[in-house]
Structure formats: C-alpha cells, structure tokens
Amino acid sequence: MNRATPYMFIAPAALIMILALFYPIGYMIWGSFRDWDPSQNISETEFVGLQNYVRLWMDPSFWESFSVTLIFAFVVVTAEMVIGVGLALLLDRNIRGMSVLRTLFILPMMIAPVVVGLVWRFMYHQTYGTFNRFLEWAGETWLGGLLGLGTVDWLGQNPLLSVIIADIWQWTPFIFILSLAALQSLPRSALEAARIDGATGWQQVIYIKLPLMAPVLIVTMLLRLIDAFKVLEVILVLTGGGPGLSTEILALRIARTAREFRELGEASAMSIYLLMMLMILTFFMFGFTRWQEARARKIKYAAEQEG
Amino acid sequence: MADTNYERQNPAYYVLIAILIFMSIGPVILLLTNSLKLDVDITSGAGGLLFMPTIRNYETALCDILWYEPDHLRFCTIRFGGAFINSLIIALISTALTLVFGCMAAYALVRFKFMGRDTASLSTLAVRMIPPAVLLVPVFALWNNAFCLDNDYGLGMWIRDTFGGRGDVCLAGTHSGIIIVYVAMNLPFVIWILQSFIVQVPRSLEEAARVDGAGPFQVFFLVVLPLIKPGLAAASIFTFRIAWNEYLLASALADRDTMTVPILIVNNASEFDGLGTIMATGMLLAIPPILFTLFASRQIITGMTAGAVKG
C-alpha cells in the first residue's frame, strides 16, 4: 500500500471541513477581538482586545439570555429523560405492532423545526388555537366550571413553558427510542433471575433495569443536552425570543446581534462563550465514554479469566 | 429474539398507547387537515375533521411552478415552487457529497494507521457539537467578503475556478455556498456513524480482494461500500434531514433566487393571513421526512442507536 493512500481517502472530507468549519471558527476567534462591523473589511477594523468579552460579561441582558438557555436546556432534557425512559419501561413488552409504534414515535423528530414551530404556533393561538378551543369547551362543562378552566395566553404569559412543551414533544422520542433499544438488549438472564427471586416490577426497574441501562442513558442525556443548545428555529417561529428576553436563548441572541445590530465582534464573542460551555459538556462525554470503555474491557477480561 | 408469542395486555394499556400515538402524531394530522381547509374553516373551528377538503392552498403555494393557472388566484404571491426546487437541489447534492467524502474518511480512520490519525479522529468528534448559530457570523462574513469570486487571488479565485457560481458576486447567494456549509456541518456525524459500521466489515474479505489484485480504492468501492449499505441508508437520511430542514445558515447565505423552503416559511409565519397556504407549505416541507420515516424507520433507529452506543 502506498503511504499516500490514507491521506487520499481523508483529503476531501478534511479539505471541506477546514474550509467551512475550522477556518471560519478561527476567523471568528480573530474577529471576536475586533470592533467588527459587517460593512468594513475585517483587516481594517480596530483591534479592541477583550472588550467584546468584557462588555458581554458586564451586560445583565446577556446573563439573562444565558440563564434562559440553561433553564431551557436543563428543563427539556430532564423532562424528556423522565418521560422517555418512563415510556420505554412501560412499552418494553412483547406487543403486536411495536415497530409501527416506534415509527409513529420518531415522526416528530424528523419534521423540520420551522414546521414544528408553525404547527405549535397555531395550537397556542389565543382564539382559534387547539389548546384554547379545548380549554374553552372544557370550561363550559360542569367539572371544568368547577375547576375554573379558561383560555390561557400561551405565548404571551407563559412563553418559556410553551417553547419547552413544544421541544418536549419533538425530542422525547429520541430518548424513548434509545432507552427502548437499551432495554431490549439487556441480558435476559439477569431479569429472569430477578423474577425468580420474586422481585416486584418496581424492584426490577430500580435495582436491575436502570443500573444496567445507565451507561447508554448517560450518553443519551449528554447528546441531547448538547443538542438542546442548538435549538433555535422552533423558538424563532413560536416567540421570536420575546416577549422581552423571556425566550431569547443564546443562539437566537447571536443571530440577532449579528443581523439586527450588526455587531459581529460581539456576536463572535458570544459564540465563543457558547462554544466554551459546549466544550465542557463534550469533555464530560469523552471522559465518560473512555471510562466506560475501560470498564467494559476490565469486566470482559475478568470474565475471561474466570471462564 | 425468535419468540413471537405476544403477551396479552390490560385494555387500559391499549388505551394508553392510543393516547400516546394521538399525542405524537396529532400535530402532524392537524397540519395536514388545516392545509386542506379554507381559511374560514380553520378560524371558525367548526367541524374539526368534518370539512370539504380543498387543494386550493396547495395551488396557491405552488402557483409559480404549476402548468395551469388556478382560478382563485390573480397574482402569484408566494413563490414556493422555486424555493422547493432550491431545497431539493441543496439537500440532494449536499447529502451525496457528505456520504461519499464521509465514508471515505471513515474508512481511512478505521482501517489505516497514518500520521495525524488520532488528531483527525478527535477533531471530527469534537466539531459534532458546534451549533449552526456559532457558524453564522464567520460563514456569513467569509462567504460575503473573503471568499468572494471577484477576488483575483487566493481562496476566492480557487473557489470560482472550482465551483463556479454566478460570476458577479460571492459564494453567498449561490447554491454551492450553502452546500459547502452543509457538507462540512454533516461530515462529523456521518464519519462517526459510518465508523461503527465499517469496523464490522470482516478484514479477510478485503484482504482476499487485495490478493486478487484490487487497489485500495477498488476494495473500498466494490467490497466495503456494498457491505455497509444499512449504515449508508441511515447516514443519508440523517444528512438529508438536516440539510432539508436547516434554516439559520441558509437564511444568512441565500438570496432571493436561492432561498429554501424553511426561509420562506419563517418569512411568512409571522403574518397569520393565508393560514391555509402557509400550512400547505409546511406540509410540503414535512412530506419527504415523513416518507423517509414511514419507509426506513428501521434504518433510522439503527443509525440513532449506533450513535448513542458508541458515545
């Protein structure tokens, strides 16, 4: 084999990733230290050192966006984990039509976020939205009247909750499918043994199923967490970041700073803050995967020694 | 597992499943029915599922590529057809390029030992986390300035010579400009997924082909590729989906002639008149991913699990 062969295989991918991923990010890091206005050639812009970073650090509205991003990411991931894993535990049975069920469940995550935003915007609509129609109808019934059900101004009064619900609808299937796969590949012998020992359903879940699924669940959660920081289109269509800054996640703020305020330097610095946060998460994921692989090797080795 | 004896379940269990299915696909059905309703029927809310379906909204949306003139229209205001074709061109070409480049790179990373392999593998994994929003600023700036085709030197000239473009301006505003970003953005994921499929290809098969006198590229295209078809299918669906659905970068790079469907939907979503029409455009954008899901859900699930299990 020629020494150059591997490089020939890797060259096209490397070239295009350098051209459209690494070079732009390097360029952005350079630009984050400049007073960068899109109308100027960047080499003519003024070098301002850490000013963009410092200005953001001092800006309370940046921290509001930052905390909205964190709240959004952690709430959706927690809710999706609980619902997704719960559903998987519930549906992990030998039932007819399981494959159809799984197909219908992955539908939401395949649909374009802008379309998801569109449909949910309609469902949240104050007068003719689906939810308010239902609440109005329910409010007129005897029980609904007793509970005081009435229409809700979804996007106006509860914007963050509304976008969180839409995201849960779209992405719970991701957790569900992966935990179902993990559940179905659990060693049957361990479950069988527990059943014979008389463990109840709950005991099996808590002492056997969840611990055995844990490695897959943690990776799934981290993947979803990293992806939750990428969510943008659904929120853009649903609320556009408003009212106020209540749903302005960092990704949206970057886009607005760049487009509306034409502050490319500041938008770059903001992107770097976001990247740093994601890097920490990814670092955890790497560390965890490495640890897990090492552990698996050790267990396998021990098993071989015994056998 | 070979046992096909289904356990009998409690009726309440089936009720629960029905509710879950309804929650999962309800919004999609709502989109479909609304796209088939007249605006008055959508806002009056009468009937729910009892209405006269009409394809009028689809006619309005597609008016610029229809071969006949719908009678209810005087002007063609939403130029959806053109955007649809742009979306198709961009998604298909970027998927094809990503797959070819991605599986070549994945193969090299799995099978060859070479200098810089660990760096390549690690950086591929690391860039998977980059959100499109982070690429927005530099890609917008570069595609509009540094990579301009009227530059007589450097990258601008190289790109013009290699990819063409419309001559007058920059990479921004061309299909190639968007395609390059999508390919770069999707490559890490595809390389990552395909690695776990290529590892499973038995080495002996490749060595046998090598002994028969096949070169490395012949081995790759004639022996390895046919064996990883399920992986390729999964990867292509994921790449197509991202390229087809992406909004932010396309909105920064596209101009009037190259805009894709998501941009058109966002531009029109804020005005809620023409509700039925905008629902019809949404439905048209949703159809390819829905079809993929219905026909290839097995591959999609395989792809997802390959991703998560490998970490």
Image: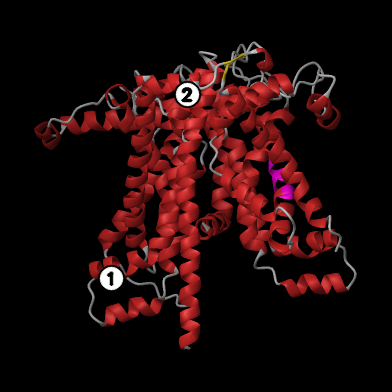
Residue lying at the far bottom in this picture: please name it: A307
Name which residue type carries label 1: Gln
Picture residue at 48% right of the left edge, 74% below the top: A298
Chain that bears disc 1: A
Q: CA distance from mark 2 to mark 1?
A: 51 Å
Q: x%, y% of residue B12?
A: 25, 59
Disc 2 and disc 1 on one polypeptide chain: yes
Q: x%, y% of residue A294?
A: 49, 67
Q: Secondary structure under badge 2?
A: helix
On screen, residue A232 versus residue B212, left or right, reads left
Q: Residues within 10 Å of mark 1 (few under 14, many from 20)?
A: some
Picture residue at 39% right of the left edge, 32% below the top: A69
The magenta span reads B93-101
**Residue B14 is at least partly visible in this image:** yes
Picture residue at 70% right of the left edge, 50% below the top: B102
Specify the label residue A53 is tagged with. Answer: 2
Location of residue A186 with respect to B258 vertically, above or below:
below
Q: Nearer the viewer, residue A36 or B226?
A: A36
| Residue B165 falls inside the magenta stretch | no
Sequence-earlier tag: 2 or 1:
2
On screen, residue B41 versus residue B155, left or right, reads left
Name which residue type carries label 2: Tyr
Q: Which residue is mark 1?
A: A204
On screen, residue A172 versus residue A25, left or right, reads left
